[in-house]
Image: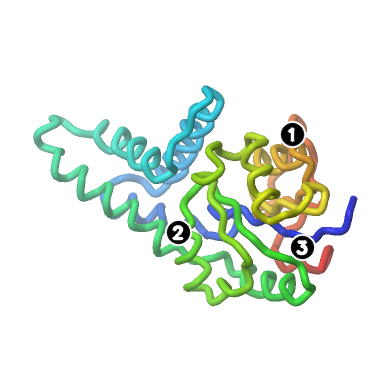
Amino acid sequence: MSRVEVVVFDVNETLSDLAPMGRRFADVGWPEETAKIWFAGLLRDGFALTAAGTTGRFANIAEETLRGILAGSASSVDAMASGVDAAVEHVMDGFFELPVHPDVPEGIRVLAASGARLVTLSNGSTNVAEGLLGTAGIRHHFERLLSVDDAGVWKPAPGAYAYAAKVCSAVPDAMMLVAVHPWDIDGAKRAGMSAAWINRRGHRYPAHFLAPDYSVTTVSELAGCIG
């Protein structure tokens, strides 16, 4: 494996803690576990559009899948019309108030001190990443915040990782993707990057995906491996 020059972080769930989104669902009368179902559904639809040769913005897909879930509980469309609008706004606003995971700030500081170039590459918007990292006090450690909105294709399609390499003026084998999602790890590996899997919950890595170069429980642990 070549020396890692650019560390590329996924944002949603990798840096951000999505647990508070469950409370947003509870606020509008749904079980907290619905947040996981919704998030998986919006990723599914984003991947489907990419597989079909087109794309869509994360926020638009998130809102539309959310409306489908919430409207599905209505006894009548008229009764729920204004309620759904307010509920959708409440849940979507939660993206801009998410915290980073506790291990993130120190791990990012150690990686930055090692001289590695740090960037993000998200299927979501750069605005969400800006707010997340700014609130955590670590935005200044990141050289660039990248979104697939500008790549024209979602991860894990090869074009998303190629876009990051082009913008960073780096070759893929000098770049490492860091993510909690095995599908993202697999996509980066197939695009020529190395990859690190952040496994905070002790899950088993799926055998049908290419294995990560590193498997760690925190960003701080990763910093000790490659810093």
Residue drawn 50% across the image and 37% down it: 43
Residue drawn 74% across the image and 59% down it: 6
Q: Is residue 185 left or right of residue 126?
A: right
| Render colour scheme | rainbow
Per the image, the residue denoted by label 1 is 209
Outermost residue on the left side: it is: 78
* Residue situated in front as seen by the camera: 199 or 162: 162
Quadrant housing the C terminus: bottom right
Characterize the local packing of mark 1: few (<14), some (14-19) or many (20 or more) Cα atoms within 10 angstroms.
some
Q: Amino acid at mark 2?
A: Val
Per the image, the residue denoted by label 3 is 222
Residue 4 rendering spot, x and y as whole percentages: 82, 58
Residue 138 rendering spot, x and y as whole percentages: 58, 74
Per the image, the residue denoted by label 2 is 128
Characterize the local packing of mark 2: few (<14), some (14-19) or many (20 or more) Cα atoms within 10 angstroms.
some
Characterize the local packing of mark 3: few (<14), some (14-19) or many (20 or more) Cα atoms within 10 angstroms.
many
Residue drawn 77% across the image and 47% down it: 172
Q: CA distance from mark 1 to mark 3?
A: 20 Å
Q: Amino acid at mark 3?
A: Leu
Residue 76 rendering spot, x and y as whole percentages: 13, 30
Identify the secondary structure beneath mark 1: loop
Rendered position, 114 above or below 216: below
Q: Amino acid at mark 1?
A: Phe
Residue 38: image quadrant is: top left
Identify the secondary structure beneath mark 3: helix
Residue drawn 68% across the image and 75% down it: 109
- Sequence-wise first label, 3 or 2: 2
Front disc: 3 or 2: 2
